[in-house]
Image (tube, grey):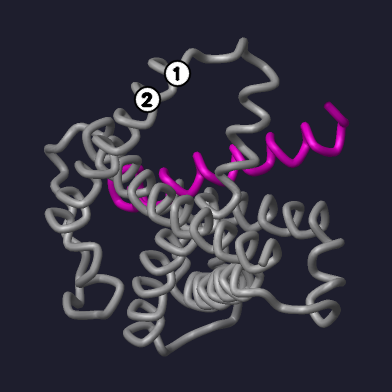
Amino acid sequence: MKQKTILKIVVDIEMTVMLLFLMTYELIGEAAHEWLGIECLFFFVIHHILNQKWSRSVFRGMYTSLRIWQTILVIGIMLTMAGSIYSGMILSKHALLFLPIKGGGAFAREIHMVSAYCGFVLISLHLGFHWGMVMGMARQMVSELSTAEKWMLRGSAALVAGYGVYAFIQREIGYYMFLQNQYVFFNFEEPLISFLADYIAIMALFVWVSHYFSKGLRYIIQTRKTK
């Protein structure tokens, strides 16, 4: 495996882990949340530098339904990241306290909430778009699985995604995404591992949805080519 590919994998894993911990917000403390956000931004920039070939080709070539889906996800993630950066600079009470920015806190808090939760879903969908490639790399590192083992893994993934539906509703993620709730509720007596487990399941849900949706688009494109 090429060194650049390994670096991409490491950066993407770092970003995914940091994203999960960013969603914990007050459970890890405001200061930790802010510094983690800055670190995540750093890795986000590195991610785009490593994938600049894709960025340079945005206005080139033909757009299939699959490419449109991928581009929508990337644009959505860019917008939510911009919203998170803008609102984070205004709301910062620790890491960026030196910035001469005052006022607009109420609006910035709403932007931060929408950007955070929509961004979480969009990044999960983006990860699902590339999940086939992730599994391809995994197959290179482990021996070939039997048919039974493959179905067991698929079944486990479906179960986790199914629990993700429950967690998505229970955690009221949709309400935060569309500002139907103005404040995020955190249970400070809840173990951090329990919170993270629910968000991992929610992420798995959207990875699962995007993976099979993208797989369906690829199948349609391939079918049209063979006609």
Q: Is residue 71 placed above or below 197 in the rendered structure?
A: below
Q: Residue at x 51, y 77 (%)?
A: 83
| Secondary structure mostly taken by the magenta-highlighted segment of the chain | helix
Residue 82 shows in this picture:
no
Q: Secondary structure at mark 1?
A: helix
Density class for disc 1 (Cα within 10 Å; few <14, some 14-19, many ≥20) is few
Please name whichever residue, 47 or 92, is drawn nearer the observer in this view of the structure. Answer: 47
Please name whichever residue, 156 or 89, is drawn nearer the observer in this view of the structure. Answer: 156
Q: Residue at x 66, y 70 (%)?
A: 67
Q: Residue at x 27, y 36 (%)?
A: 160
Q: Is residue 21 placed above or below 146 in the rendered structure?
A: below
Q: Which numbered disc covers residue 136?
A: none
Q: Secondary structure at mark 2?
A: helix
Residue type, mark 2 in image: Trp
Inter-mark Cα distance, 1 to 2 = 6 Å
Residue 162 at what x, y percent from top left?
A: 22, 44
Residue 169 at what x, y percent from top left?
A: 15, 58
Residue 138 within the segment the image draws in magenta = no
Residue 130 shows in this picture:
yes
Residue 35 at what x, y percent from top left?
A: 54, 51
Query: Which quarter of the figure has residue 118?
Result: bottom left
Left or right, 50 with reference to 63 = right
Left or right, 45 with reference to 65 = right
Which residue lies under the disc numbered 1?
A: 147
User: Is label 1 in contact with label 2 (beta carbons under 8 Å)?
Assistant: yes
Q: Which numbered disc covers residue 151?
A: 2
Density class for disc 2 (Cα within 10 Å; few <14, some 14-19, many ≥20) is few
Q: Residue at x 23, y 69 (%)?
A: 174
Which region is colored magenta?
A: 1-29
Where's the C terminus, which quadrant? Answer: bottom right
